[in-house]
Image (cartoon, helix red, strand yellow):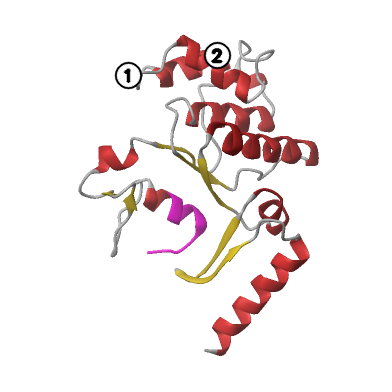
């Protein structure tokens, strides 16, 4: 099996078959108790897909129908959380990439997940969009108490919004650091050090 970032996220979500090992979420094995394991997870894998000819609201409404306890009130809540109130009734085909990413996050948190998985969430965004998405991620984590797992190669963005960083090389964890308060230069130094030590083993 490949050991890329997206592959790891897909494996956690049960979208890609495990060759070996296991994935446990809240104590539930993704193979044996898929529904219980996946129940409290939201995710964006790669770029979120939508029905472009429908409005943002109608896209969320379709996904809300997949859950028992997601009503119109909750849809309005997530729209407000991601800051799309003024554009939610427009067709998604008119959305910028940043707006689609925010709509993707709204969809991912509809069911009030305990864990949110984001795969390269700032890819393709302009600087303003990156800042807005970073602030949104931090806000969701702090205000809604959601744990967020981000896969990214962008050390600056990771240092700006994450409290813990795990470095993976060829499927193996080679670094695990608490990074709250650590600037990007310090994080780069940690990354380089861990890579060098692994190479010298």
Could you tell me which quadrant the N terminus lies in? bottom left
- Please provide percent x and percent y for residue 148: 53, 44
Asked if 47 appears above or below 83 in the picture, the reply is below
Q: Residue furthest bottom?
A: 200
Q: Quadrant of residue 137?
A: top right
Q: Nearer the viewer, residue 92 or 11?
A: 11
Asked if 86 appears above or below 49 in the picture, the reply is above
Q: Residue at x 59, y 19 (%)?
A: 79
Q: Secondary structure at mark 2?
A: helix
Residue stretch rendered in magenta on the structure: 1-9
Is residue 73 found left or right of 93 in the rendered image?
Answer: left
Identify the residue position indicated by label 2 in the image: 76
Q: Nearer the viewer, residue 58 or 182?
A: 182
Q: Residues within 10 Å of mark 2 (few under 14, many from 20)?
A: some
Query: How far apart are the two marked residues, 2 and 1, measured between alpha carbons?
Result: 16 Å
Q: Residue at x 42, y 26 (%)?
A: 111
Asked if 75 appears above or below 21 in the picture, the reply is above
Q: Residues within 10 Å of mark 1 (few under 14, many from 20)?
A: few
Q: Nearer the viewer, residue 116 or 3?
A: 116
Identify the residue position indicated by label 1 in the image: 68
Is residue 19 found left or right of 42 in the rendered image?
Answer: left
Q: Is residue 62 magenta?
A: no
């Amino acid at each position: 099996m490949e050991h890329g970032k997206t592959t790891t996220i897909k494996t956690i979500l049960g979208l890609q078959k495990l060759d070996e090992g296991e994935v446990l979420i809240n104590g539930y094995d993704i193979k044996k108790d898929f529904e219980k394991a996946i129940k409290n997870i939201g995710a964006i894998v790669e770029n979120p897909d939508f029905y472009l000819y429908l409005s943002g609201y109608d896209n969320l409404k379709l996904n809300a129908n997949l859950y028992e306890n997601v009503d119109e009130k909750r849809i309005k809540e997530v729209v407000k959380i991601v800051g799309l109130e003024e554009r939610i009734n427009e067709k998604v085909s008119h959305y910028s990439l940043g707006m689609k990413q925010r709509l993707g996050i709204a969809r991912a948190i509809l069911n009030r997940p305990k864990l949110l998985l984001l795969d390269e969430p700032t890819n393709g965004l302009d600087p303003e969009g990156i800042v807005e998405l970073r602030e949104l991620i931090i806000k969701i984590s702090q205000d809604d108490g959601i744990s967020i797992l981000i896969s990214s190669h962008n050390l600056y963005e990771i240092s700006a919004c994450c409290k813990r960083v795990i470095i993976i090389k060829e499927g193996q964890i080679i670094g695990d650091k608490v990074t709250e308060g650590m600037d990007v230069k310090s994080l780069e130094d940690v990354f380089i050090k861990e890579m060098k030590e692994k190479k010298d083993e």
